[in-house]
Image (cartoon, rainbow, N blue to C red):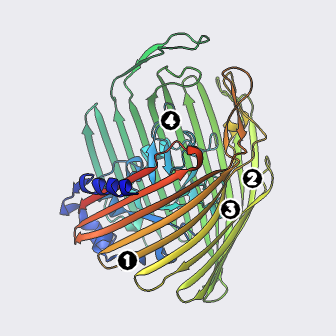
Amino acid sequence: MKNFVAYIFLVCIFGLNIQVKSDSLLTLQNVQKVANYQMSFEEISNITISTVSKRIEKLSEAPGIVSIITSSDIRAYGASSLWDLMNKVPSIQPLSSHLFRKNKMSLRGDLIDHADNHVLILLNGRPLREGFNTGQNFSVYMTFPLDVISRIEVIRGPGSVLYGTNAFAGVINIITKKGNEVGEHSFAVGGGNHDTNIQKFTSYYDSEDFNAIFSFFRKESTGWDFSLSTSHPSPALPTLNDSTDYAERSMGMFANISWGNLQINSFYSETKYDMLGIIPYWSRASRNLARRGFIDAGYLLELSDKWKVQSNVTFNYYDLRIDQSEHIATDTIIESFLHGHLSDDVDILFGGLVNNLRRNERISESPIPVSYSTYDYAIYAQLDYKILNNLKFTTGAQYIFPEAAAKDIVPRFGLVYNINENWGLKILHSDSFRSAGPVEQLIMNPVLLGNPNLEPEKIQTTDIHLFYETEKQSYYLTWFCSEYSELITRLPTGVPGQTMFGNSKERVKVQGLEFEFKYKLSEHWFLNGSSMYQKTQNDKMLAPNFMAKMVSCLI
C-alpha cells in the first residue's frame, strides 16, 4: 500500500498535462455558464444528469458512480477525439489490438479480449451498437465530432437494468447540443507530422419551435512506417514479409433536429486504417474499412405534469471490410417507457423493448457463411423512494427473454444518503449481462468456431461510494467488488490450433478502490486527479493493477 501511495504521489507531481486556451474560446461557455470550473463544487454536485435513471436527477442523488465531461472540459483538455478524451476519465484505459485500433475501453480493469462489448455507448440516451460483433466501436471513438458535444456522462458499473446487453462494466452517454445551444457557426483546420490534416465544421439553425445542428469531422494521416515478418511461422503458413505506413483516414458526421417534442438524431462515420493482420495470418499488413450509420427518432408524449411517455425507434447499420471479407449487419430497437411521480417521494419508470439483429446474405469471403435474424425482448422497471428528505432508496429489474438464449432477470438496489451539505454516501448493487454476438455464435474458419448455444455473460457489482464537496475542492472514494460468471471465452476443440467459443464455468472476482479529486486553484486554473487499484482473482484480467491520472488546465 505504501508503494501505491508513493506511485500516486509521483504521478501527481510529474504527470501534469497543462493546456492553455485563449480568452476568445471562452465566449460561449460564459454565455451558457457551462464552464463548470467557474462554478463552486457544491454547484457542480447539483448538476442534473439523465443517464443513471433515464430521467433528470441531481448527480449527488443519482444511484450510480458517474463522471461528467462538459464541453468546456473538452476545450480545456485539448482532446482531438473521443479516444483521447476517454483517457482523462477515472478508471478507463483506452486500448488497441492488432486487428482493431483505438477500439477498447477497459473500465475498472475489465479486459478479456479486444472487443469493446462490456461498455455500452449511448448517443443522447440511445444505444450506438453494431450488430455484427457488438464490440467494434473504433469508428465512434475516432470520428465523432467533439464540437457538438454538450457533455458526456460515464457510469462506472453495470447498467443493464435500463439499457440491456453490453451495459456490463459501464455506460458512456454522449449528450449533444441542440441548435439553440450553439450560438455560432465554426470551422477549423489543423495539421501535424506524418502528413496529418484535420478539418471540422459545425453549423446550426434556430427558430421558435424548430432547431437543427450539423457537425462534420475529418482526419487523414499517413502514419508511421511499419515493417513486419513471421520469424517463426506455423508449418501450415508461409513465411510472410510486409510493410505498411499505418495510415488513418476517418470521417464522421452528426445531425440533430428538434421540432417540439420530436427529436431526430443521426450519425455516420467512415474509417479506414492499416492494421497488423488477421487470423490465421497474424503478421500480414492489411486494412480495415468500416462504415457505420445511426438514426434515432424519439417522441415525448406528455400525459400530464407528472406522467410522460418516451418512445424511440433506433436503427444501427454496420459495414465492415477486413482485408478480402465484408460484413454488413443491422441492429433495430423499438422501445417505449413510462415515467411518472406517484407522490412527491415516489418515482416510477416502466418500459419495454424489441431488439432485432439481422444479416441478410453472405457477402464476399465472410467467415460467417449464413444469414441470421434474431429477436430479443425485454421489460424493465425502476422505483425511487425518498425515505427521508436526504435518504433515497432505489430498486429495479429487467426481465429478458431472448430468442436464442434462456430467460433471465437482472436486478439493482441502492441507497443514496446525503449526510449533510458536504458529505454523501452511496451503497449500490447491480447485475448486468452481455448477450453473445453473431460472430461468437456463427463464425467458422480453420482456427476459430462459433457456438450457437452460448449463454449471456453475467456480472454482479457492489459499490460503496463516499464523497466530500466544498466550494473549491471535492474528493470521491469508491470501493467496488464485481463477480463475473458465464464469461465467453475460447476453448480448445481437440483439433491442433483450433478453438471454439464457449462459456467458462469459472467465476472471476475483482475488487478495487478508486480515488478521485478535483481542486480549484483559481477561477481559471484547476486540477483533476484519479487513481485506481484493482485485484483480479487468479489474475484472469489482462489489465494493470494500478492506474493513476492527473490533469492540470488553465482556461
Do residues under tags 3 and 1 come within 8 Å of each other at their CB atoms? Answer: no
SS for callout 1? strand
Q: Is residue 455 left or right of residue 540?
A: right
What kind of residue is marked 4? Phe
Cα gap from disc 1 to disc 4, whole angstroms: 40 Å
- Marks 4 and 2: which is nearer the front? 4
- Marks 1 and 2: which is nearer the front? 1
Do residues under tags 1 and 2 come within 8 Å of each other at their CB atoms? Answer: no
Q: Which residue is mark 2?
A: 376
What kind of residue is marked 2? Asp
Q: Reading the chain from its start, which is encountered first: label 3 or label 1?
A: 3
Q: Which residue is mark 4?
A: 100
SS for callout 3? strand
Q: Is residue 392 left or right of residue 530?
A: right
Cα gap from disc 2 to disc 3, whole angstroms: 12 Å
Residue at 46% in and 49% down: 545
Label 4 neighbourhood size at 10 Å, few (<14), some (14-19), many (20+)?
A: many
- Marks 3 and 4: which is nearer the front? 4
Tell me the quarter of the picture where residue 71 sits: bottom left
Do residues under tags 1 and 4 come within 8 Å of each other at their CB atoms? Answer: no
